Image (spheres, helix red, strand yellow):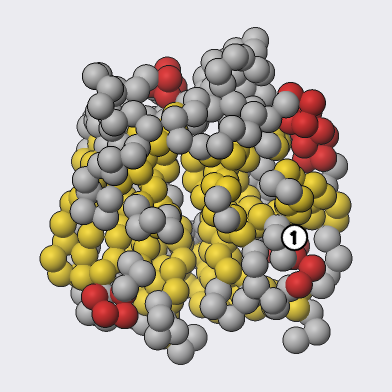
Amino acid sequence: MNRKIPKSLAALACALALSPVAAAQDYRAETVVDGLENPWSIAFLPDGRMLVTEHPGRLRVVEDGQLIDAPVEGLPPIFHSGQAGLFEVLPSRDFADTGVLYLSFAHGTEDANHTRIVRAVFDGRRLTDVTPIFTTHPAKSGDAHGGGRMMKLPDGTLLLTLGDGFFFREESQKLDSHMGTIVRINTDGSVPADNPFVGRDGVLPEIYSYGHRHVQGLALDGDRLYAHEHGPRGGDEINLVEPGRNYGWPVITYGRDYSRALISPFTEREGMEQPLLQWTPSIAPAGLALYEADLFPQWRGSLLVAALAEKSLRRVEMVDGMPGRQEVLMEESGERMRDVRVGPDGAVYLATDEKKGRVIRLVPASE
């Protein structure tokens, strides 16, 4: 596939991003559970239970609408500081038969840490057979920009999003570093034979795409893989991700540094991909989902973006793979939105990144 995004289309998407439409109140927000500490991700099990990760390093179970008091036992040691902590929980597709979960988290110390994935078996109370299957290279210092989102692709492989470590943004352009990349592995941690850089000397074979800043959202629409990433002061992006492509950070960017200093004079360069959409000022996108259910027929085909800084849920209409009209939802809550998921019931579930966080369920206002 070769879907080069013309700069004119990127500019149009930028203009649309700057003037979102205020959403009509066609939804109602309900609290599913509260009493969570900085919930980071939500997952649904086949039997109706929900799993929620808490960033400080706890895995929680919600059953019959109630938060089980005791956290799940048996988690591996987790480095929690700043943005580092427990990230995502992802049930395997055969969870009903195997009980297998995948967890992503920060591993190590302030001076030397990695993003790691473990495979484990969940019996309802605790994890057993906890086995590391992937650990990023090299180690980095600090507690920022570790990525952590996972996705299972239809071919059975596993994607993990990563950040540039904040202080190490030049690593995003290096193919001997996992920083600032999306990686693709098999579920045992081995490298898929058709990864784009397999067999190249000096290149980490897990790398699927590179030149990213801090990817924290993935969504799949047919054969289109979308990812969003944090810019610095502006320049948040939604990208169409294709294997082997370079997404430009920090050589090209629409954002400025936090000091307002210029990071790069370039917003485009040959061999580097343009975003489908960019947000300036930043909304801090943190979770991403494609809505394909029936409960909100008017939302079907839209990307849902959980936003931290904007304290909102953005709905981005997608037309033939390109972003169109946007709506800003949930501003009335005043809460940082960390994750968004479409539940088995077609409702939209949100995790709020607050010290006293909660899981929220959106249903039609008339329901």
Q: Residue furthest left?
A: 129
Label 1 secondary element: strand
32 and 90: which one is in front?
Answer: 90
- Taking 73 as reference, is 260 left or right? right
Residue at 55% x, 74% y is 343
- Taking 290 as reference, is 56 left or right? left
Q: Position of residue 249 (x, y in %)?
A: 52, 23
159 and 123: which one is in front?
Answer: 159
Residue at 35% x, 52% y is 158
Count of numbered badges drawn on the protein: 1
Q: Position of residue 192 (x, y in %)?
A: 29, 43
107 and 151: which one is in front?
Answer: 151
Measured along the vertical axis of the image, is residue 353 above or below residue 249?
Answer: below
Residue 121 visible in the displayed image: yes
- Taking 203 as reference, is 367 left or right? right
Q: Position of residue 201 (x, y in %)?
A: 24, 19
Q: Residue furthest bottom?
A: 64
Measured along the vertical axis of the image, is residue 180 above or below residue 323?
Answer: above
Residue at 42% x, 24% y is 172
**Residue neighbourhood size for the residue with mark 1, other residues' Cα within 10 Å, grouped as few (<14), some (14–19), many (≥20):** many
Within the image, what quadrant is residue 231 found in?
Answer: top right
Measured along the vertical axis of the image, is residue 319 above or below residue 18?
Answer: below
The amino acid marked with disc number 1 is Leu
Residue at 58% x, 69% y is 342
For label 1, the residue is: 329
> Which of the image's four quarters has the N terminus?
top right
Residue 258 visible in the displayed image: no
- Taking 177 as reference, is 34 left or right? right
> Which of the image's four quarters has the C terminus?
bottom right
